[in-house]
Image: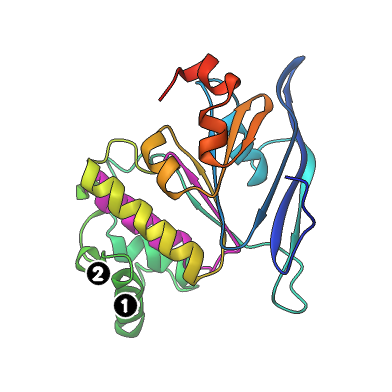
Amino acid sequence: MQNSCGFCCTKINNISVKRGSKQILKNVNIHIHCGKLTAIIGKNGAGKSTLLRAILGEIPHEGDISFKSKTKGQTKIRIGYVPQKLDLENSPITVYDMVATYSSNVPVFLYKSKKLHEKIKEHLKAFGAEELIDRKVNRLSGGELQRVMLALAMMSKPDLLILDEPISGIDKNGKEQFYEKIYQLKNTEDIAVIIVSHDFEYVKKYADNVILLNQTIEEEGTPEKVFQSAKFIEVFGKI
C-alpha cells in the first residue's frame, strides 16, 4: 500500500530472509493503520510463518519495522502474538500460572496472590475465559486455549497483534466467535492486526486488506480484489 502514514501506523519495510543461498522472502513491505486487519494468505511454503518470525525478531533478516504511535514519546512498538499451536500436552500449569508468570515478577510457585488472581480473572472475562483460570492448560480445548492465548497476547496492550493460523482445528462456531473478538479488538483497542489464515470465508468477511504471499507480495488489496485476481485463481482456483 502506498498511501502516506496517518495518525498511527505500523510499516514493515523490505523484509527479506535467506537460508544459505535459498531466498525465502524478498522485499516484503506491509503498511497497516491502527484499527485495520491485514490477512496474509498463500500456499504452503510461501513464507508466511517465516515472515511472522522475522517481524517478531526470532530469525535473522534484512529490513525493519517502523512505527508511528498515537502516544506522544512512544517509539518502540509493542507486539502481541498468538501462535498456531503450543506443545503443552505434558504441562502441569494452570491458566492462572501461565498468565501470572507473564504478569508478575514474583515466581508463581512461591506465592499465589489473591489480588493478582482477581485481576487476571477480570482480564480473562473480556475474552470469555474467566471460568478457565484454575484449569490446567493441557486440559483446554483448542478454542479455549486460543481464547486464553489471545487474552495473554493482549496483556501488554500491543500496538500490533500477530496471529498465526489461530483457529486451526476449531469448530465453525468457535471460528466465528474468534474473528468477532478480533474485529472488536481492532476497533475498540485501535490496534493493527496481522493474521495468517487459510479460512477464506472469514478473511473475506473480516479483513480490511489481504496479501497474497509467495516469497514476495504477489497481490494486495481488498478481499474481493485479491480473490478475483489471476494470481489467486492460479494458486487456489475460484471461490
Instruction: Work out how far the residue at label 1 is from the one at label 2, CA to CA, in angstroms.
Output: 7 Å
Amino acid at circle 2: Glu
Coordinates of residue 203 in the picture (x, y in percent): 44, 41
Pick whichever, 148 or 238, lies toward us. Answer: 238
Which image quadrant for residue 148? bottom left
Q: Residue furthest bottom?
A: 115
Up-down relation of residue 181 to residue 65 (above or below): below
Pick whichever, 52 or 32, lies toward us. Answer: 32
* Numbered circle sitting on residue 168: none
Which residue is depicted at the point 36% across and 73% down? 123
Provide the residue designation for mark 1. 122
Q: Is residue 206 left or right of residue 191?
A: left
Magenta span contains residue 145: yes
Provide the residue designation for mark 2. 130
Coordinates of residue 10 in the picture (x, y in percent): 70, 56
Pick whichever, 95 or 176, lies toward us. Answer: 176
Which image quadrant for residue 115? bottom left
Which residue is depicted at the point 54% across and 23% down? 232
Query: Is disc 1 surrounded by few (<14), some (14 to 19) or many (20+) residues within 10 Å?
Result: few
Pick whichever, 123 or 40, lies toward us. Answer: 40
Q: Is residue 211 left or right of residue 123?
A: right
* SS at badge 2: helix
- Span shown in magenta: 141-165
Which residue is depicted at the point 25% across and 53% down? 144
Which residue is depicted at the point 64% across and 36% down? 220
Locate the C terminus by quadrant.
Answer: top left
Up-down relation of residue 21 to residue 139 (above or below): above
Coordinates of residue 236 in the picture (x, y in percent): 46, 19
Residue contact at pointers 1 and 2, CB within 8 angstroms = yes
Amino acid at circle 1: Glu
